[in-house]
Amino acid sequence: MKAFPSTDNRQAWAQRALALIRDCHLALDQAKEEQPFLQEMCRFLVDSGGYPLAWVGLIENKESRKIHRVAQAGLALGWLEFLPATWPGDGPGRDPVATAIRTGQPAWCSDIPSVSTGAPYAEVAEALGLLSCLALPLSRQGRVYGVLALYASEPGAFSPEIRDFLQTLTAFGDQGLTNLRLQKQLAALTGDLAAKNRLLESFPFPS
């Protein structure tokens, strides 16, 4: 299945985009924790978006350059074993995931077999029909903390129009996660204040 119909079939693309927006709203409404939401996001990008593979990785820190994959969906999950668990710290690089993390901007590869020649995963990607990739950084207060990677079954699948839409969708989901974290912090603060009030009320005060 193609990730999105080409732009000459704008009606079909609009229907697919609306389905993704609907799914994102629904996932955020039901979200209680961060990881289940990220897993659900990968699922609807595969099921409603038509992408053969989607995964989310969180970075440990800029010093270790480790990527922890915390959510994934699609028919080619075994391919993730061939991806590096770290990213290069400098240099231009050709890996969209590494570039997105380093720059904080979307990065893409329009033809994995030709652009990633020599990379250990390129041959496997081609065998599985993963021919192009888009990496979207996840950021909080201007700091990149993770990345969403999407793969398509045809080269050049991520046109500027599609990249802009997916970047906006990801930013919307990212903002929802920020709100979820703030709600949890507020609930924890409220519980702490209530506990302190109960403690104060338990002390006898002279009349």
Image (spheres, rainbow, N blue to C red):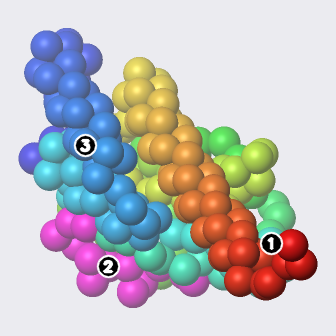
Q: Amino acid at mark 1?
A: Lys
Give me the disc on residue 26: 3
Please state which amino acid type lies under the numbered disc 3: Leu
Residue at left offset 49%, top offset 44%: 176
Question: Closer to the camera, 85 or 169?
Answer: 169
Q: Which residue is mark 2?
A: 79
| Stretch of the chain drawn in magenta | 73-87
Front label number (1 vs 3): 3
Discs 2/3, front: 3
Percent of width and height locating residue 1: 10, 47
Asked which secondary structure carries label 1, the reply is loop
Marks 2/3: CA distance?
A: 29 Å
> Residue drawn at (23%, 33%), measured in percent from left and top?
22
Which mark is first along the chain, 3 or 1?
3
Number of numbered discs present?
Answer: 3
Which type of secondary structure does the marked residue at label 3 adopt? helix
Identify the residue shown where x is 66% and y is 42%.
105
Q: Are marks 1 and 2 in contact (CB under 8 Å)?
A: no
Question: Which residue matches tag 1?
Answer: 62
| Left or right: 21, with 86 as reference point | left
* Label 2 close to label 3 by CB (< 8 Å): no
Q: Residue furthest front?
A: 207
Taking the image as drawn, is residue 95 in sight?
no
Question: Which residue occupies the foreground of this view, 94 or 195?
Answer: 195
Nearer the observer, 82 or 193: 193
x and y, in percent, of residue 66 in the image: 66, 81
Q: Is residue 135 magenta?
A: no
Depicted 24 relative to depicted 138: above or below:
above
Figure quadrant of residue 38: bottom left
**Image height check: is 126 above or below 148?**
below
Tag 2: amino acid: Trp
